[in-house]
Amino acid sequence: MNNNYLYELGKWLGDRRGFPRVGIINTELQLVKDTNRFLEKQFKQKPVLRKITKKENKTMFGEEAYETFIVSSPIHKRLENEIQKIKEDINSLKKKQILSFLSGFIDAEGTIDLKNDQIVISVGKKNEEIKELIYLLIKRLEWEVRVWDCVKEWKISVKSNKEIIKQLKKNVKHPQKKALLNFNIANADKKYLDYIQNVKKVKSLDLKQKFCIHEDSARRILRYFTKLKKIKKITKTRPYVYVPI
């Protein structure tokens, strides 16, 4: 398994489709297109690539998302076996291999929290084995990490520093996350800033309702606009209110 394969395997583990489909679903079209090319090249099958609207997929993906997949139970089982092999051989993996795998998972399930200088990875409560795997892989990289219980999911946070950011910049491919690591605003997030500047005063609930996004995503957007000094918080208690600078 080369580094690109490990990256795609990590992304698949985070955003995978249900058995027997092999593929991912994500709001970022570029990530889905990358996986589409990988599936076709690696497994010599033409994947299905399509847009999913809010009407079809009433989840946290908002107005629209994208998916790519091939239908193959043998390939699905093969990928599951390779995840199991990673679990069993953690101590034999090189750090570059671990970083590639984790970068794929971060692109699928991670958040770059600039305000608190951390990378936060979410894992559903039904996936405790995945939570343990991600935790152990991060420990192998000797990054400062902690895990906490958020009722419906596990949160795994890595305290970021210049070296970690440098390594992730080279490995993550999600346009929004790459922009965050470079302290820039991703093209996909400019619509939120335009809205805030237009209405002058906003709460996370306003973004959630206006753009049909998960409230956690709305809070993250507001935190990172604050870190970039595009907006400021004018209340001390929740619900926090933000205004443009």
Image (cartoon, rainbow, N blue to C red):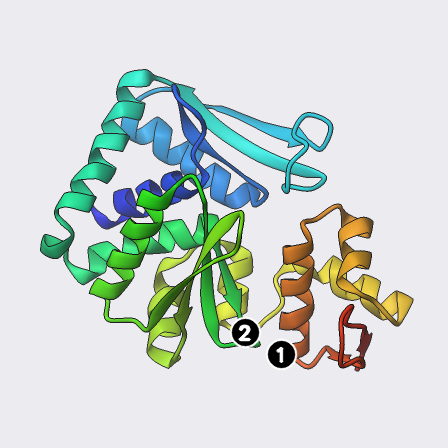
Q: Taking the image as drawn, is residue 101 in sight?
A: no
For mark 2, what is the residue? 114
Q: Residue at x 26, y 18 (%)?
A: 74
The correct choice, above or below, for 4 with respect to 140 in the image is: above
Side of 166 where 29 appears, left or right? right
Circle 2/circle 1 CB separation < 8 Å = yes
Of the pair 90 and 169, the residue shown nearer to us: 90
The correct choice, above or below, for 243 with respect to 220 in the image is: below
Quadrant location of the C terminus in the rendered image:
bottom right
What is the residue that sits farthest to the left in this orientation? 92
SS label for mark 1: helix
Q: Residue at x 39, y 41 (%)?
A: 127
Side of 188 where 46 appears, left or right? left
For mark 1, what is the residue? 227
The residues tagged by marks 2 and 1 sit, at their Cα atoms, a distance apart of: 6 Å
10 Å neighbourhood of mark 1: few (<14), some, or many (≥20)? some
Tag 2: residue type? Leu
